Image: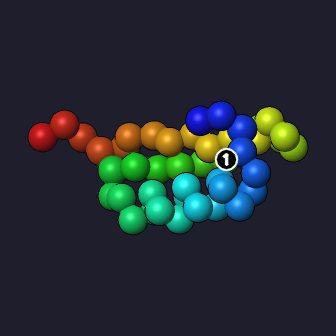
Amino acid sequence: MDPMPPYERMIVHTILAEQVDIKTESIGDGKTRRVVVRFVGGIE
C-alpha cells in the first residue's frame, strides 16, 4: 500500500488481524513507512 500515517496503518493492522489467512507488517522509515499485506493461507 502507499505510505500512510501511523494511525491509518494501525487501523489496517487492527482490521486485518481478524483474518486467519492474512498477515500484515509495516516496512520503511518515516514518511515512507507503509503496510504490506500478505496472503499466508493455503489453497483448498
Res 27 visible: no
In the visual, does 5 lie left or right of 11?
right
Position of 13 relative to 4 (above/below): below
Residue 33 in the image, given as x and y percentages of width and height = 76, 41
Residue name at image x 64 percent, y 61 percent: 10
Res 9 visible: yes
- Tally the numbered discs: 1
Q: Residue furthest left?
A: 44
In the visual, does 4 lie left or right of 25?
right
Position of 15 relative to 23 (above/below): below
Type of the residue with mark 1: Ser
Residue 5 in the image, given as x and y percentages of width and height = 76, 51
Q: Residue furthest right?
A: 30
Give the quadrant of the C terminus.
Answer: top left
Q: Residue 13, located in which quarter of the rendered image?
A: bottom right
Residue 43 in the image, given as x and y percentages of width and height = 19, 37
> Which residue matches tag 1?
26
Q: Which class describes the residues within 10 Å of circle 1: few (<14), some (14-19), or many (20+)? A: some
Depth check: give the residue in front, 16 or 27: 16
Residue 39 in the image, given as x and y percentages of width and height = 38, 40
